[in-house]
Image: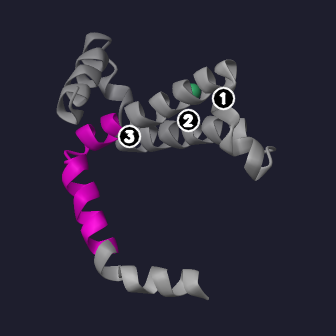
Amino acid sequence: MTLEALTARQRAFSEARAWGPFHTPKNLVMALTGEVGELTELFQWLTPTEAESATADPATRARVEDELADVLLYLVRLADVLNVDLLAAANAKIDRNEHRFPTDIGKAALEK
Ligand SMILES: [Mg+2]
């Protein structure tokens, strides 16, 4: 499935339930933030080692997948409402980051 198809499916889901009036940018940002908080909660008291292997446990993996999906769906819906091409914006950001953080700087930091 493409991001465009996911956006269309999420839009249709919202329209079928007449949720448009509730899906203001402010509300969607707040909902997105709440879902990031739910994802954070799954990791907050784990050690770094425990966090790296958290998804080895099937129950935890299911919860992580569920919260990641919530985050993605609100992000996709927010971008749709704001008429933002999320893939174009993300690629433009990576372009800027590639210029901002040249690979030779990263290698030099690792060699110290
Ligand atoms: Mg959630």
Q: Position of residue 85 (x, y in %)?
A: 19, 48
Q: Disc number at residue 75?
A: 3
Disc 3 residue type (three-letter): Leu
Q: Residue at x 25, y 24 (%)?
A: 11
Q: Position of residue 42 (x, y in %)?
A: 70, 35
State yes or no: residue 111 in magenta: no
Disc 2 target residue: 35
47 above or below 111? Answer: above
Q: Viewer-proximal residue, 103 or 75?
A: 103
Mark 1 falls on what kind of element? helix
Q: Residue at x 28, y 43 (%)?
A: 79
Q: Earlier in the sequence, mark 2 or mark 3?
A: 2
Disc 2 residue type (three-letter): Glu
Q: Earlier in the sequence, mark 2 or mark 1?
A: 2
How many numbered marks does the figure carry?
3
Disc 1 residue type (three-letter): Ala
Mark 3 falls on what kind of element? helix
Q: Residue at x 50, y 33 (%)?
A: 68
Mark 2–mark 1 contact, CB under 8 Å? no
State yes or no: residue 89 in magenta: yes
Classify 10 Å Cα crowding around label 3: few (below 14), some (14-19), many (20 and above). Answer: some
Q: Position of residue 95 (x, y in %)?
A: 25, 69
The quadrant where residue 13 appears: top left
Classify 10 Å Cα crowding around label 2: few (below 14), some (14-19), many (20 and above). Answer: many
Q: Residue at x 23, y 17 (%)?
A: 12
Quarter of the picture holding the C terminus: bottom right
Q: Which residues are magenta?
A: 76-97
29 above or below 62? Answer: below
Of marks 3 and 1, the one in the foreground: 1
Q: Earlier in the sequence, mark 3 or mark 1?
A: 1
Disc 1 target residue: 56
